Image (cartoon, helix red, strand yellow):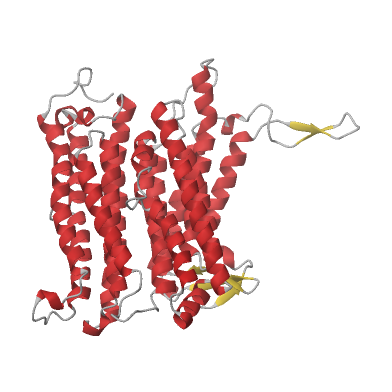
Amino acid sequence: MSNGNEFDTDMIETLGPEFTVFVGLLLIMVVPNLGNGTFRIPGTPIRLPWFLGGTRFKAVASPRLPGLIAVLTMALALFQVIWYLLDATSADGQDIKASGVFIFKVNMFSRIFEAIFFAALLLAAIASLDRLPIGSQKSDDIDVLFNNRRQADFYILMLTSALGMSVVALAQDMFVLFVGLELASFSTYILVAFHKESRAGSEGGAKYFIVGSVASAVGLYGLSMLYLWAGSLQFHELAAQWEAQGATSLSMMALGFVLVGFAFKISAAPFHFAAPDAYSGANSPVAGVLATASKAMGMLGLMRVLLIITVPEANTDGSAIWIGLLGVLAAITMTWGNIAALGSENPKRMLAYSSVAHAGYMLAALTAIGAWNWGLVDNAGVAMDVVVAALLFHMFVLVFFKLGAFLVLGVLEMEGGASRLSSLAGLGKREPLLAVAMFLFMISLAGVPPMAGFLSKLLVIMGIVEVATGTGSLSSIGDAHWVWWLALLMVVNSAISMFYYLGVGVVMYYHEPEEGRKGPLA
């Protein structure tokens, strides 16, 4: 049984990972600036040391220090989350209140999402340690001095994003969720455009910021309408109001606006058009975060709204009222993502479109839960848990394999660019281990057995089919719920994706490398 607690010193243990990230953020802001600086007492010649500014102490003068602090912070936070997940006494969870209002809920479900967020950000932080050139502080090269100063900025943004994602994972109030969402989003907007010296980076960042800001404004408008309708933004109160009143014109409009905001976060078609430019303009570790942690954050918000607030409402056919719209959105998203990826010659844009397709697969799983076809299912709770577990497993697969693919592209970027598929040509001969890793990432994302990507897609498809057919004792396929078509469409789209995923392997092993890229990576 969960219990509610006001904010006090006991919360430090409960919110351990969040406090770790916050402390790491403060350390990156303060430690690299420690020096022999002093300040003068007004009206006197007396100067007192305050250890900020001036000539920096040698122990903290290295430009690599912010990156190391960020990596250690994320590693410790991830360890704390895993420790929580392994602790059997944590299964019941804990509610955290402030002034009598439920703010956070710490349980297994929220910690699983935090594990996804922290794992993705940790890998990206490690991969970014050598992304910005670091030179001697005695160098007069302005680029070296500029990049040395930007080390702290980059990792401050990364930890701020981690903190925002944690708030989203724990939130039990729509406004708190929105604050966490925007805290993470604004950090990623800047990270996308961090290499603003390049045209692709500045344009991708500007487009991502403008479209994201519009989506956030639409979502905020939806929140205001929800508050106007229910008088509260607490999840449990919104769910009770939805169950008591059902769907009204005001609540449906509010829900629609909120879903638009989340659709942008997960790059669902047709709200995906900023994603390819953002992925191709950002450096590869940041693009990997967008494709994994940022997408999981948006999916979590969508699950909170659809599965906590609106699922209690059911119309005459026993399904949630949003199921039709979400099913169409899932079908369009997965199909358009794969078709667009087929024609892409930029590997980062290809992976961006494949992320759109994967968003469609996850939306299909949510649609199956909303089908609410539990009258035909022997054990409804187990069926729902299977679909949710498959969805979570698929997100973990994306973290390790989609992010892994972006990190391989990051290595090629440091060599001379990865904006063309031909950048991978001959990689099998030049760097066999790197090529094998990239090929494994590709076939797992494609869903080739026995890779983890195959298992995650299979579990999602099996969950959808179980919900659609119930016990399986059907006289004809027409007796099944229509969501089984989404499972069939997933199979077809997985087959389509084989062409561009395996095409990467063909380029690596059968194409000759570009001029100037015939030797091993330096």
Residue at x 41%, y 27% (from the top left corner)? 199
Q: Looking at this view, is 504 or 141 the one in front?
A: 504
Left or right of 460 on screen, residue 8: right
For the residue pair 180 and 334, the one nearer the viewer reads as 334
Residue depicted at x 39% and y 71%: 307
Up/down of 58 relative to 316, above or below: above
Residue 363 placement (x, y as % from top left): 30, 61
Question: Which of these two is toward me, 139 or 273?
Answer: 273
Which residue reaches farthest front?
Answer: 249
Residue drawn 44% across and 79% down? 246
Residue 164: x, y in percent? 51, 53
Q: Is residue 240 above or below residue 494?
A: below
Q: Position of residue 405 (x, y in %)?
A: 27, 41
Is 398 left or right of 43, judged from the image as shown? Answer: left
Side of 268 where 468 appears, left or right: left
- With respect to residue 465, does 128 lie above or below? above
On the question of residue 510 being in view, the answer is yes
Check the image and name the residue furthest to the top: 140
Residue pictured at 49% horizontal, 33% vertical: 64
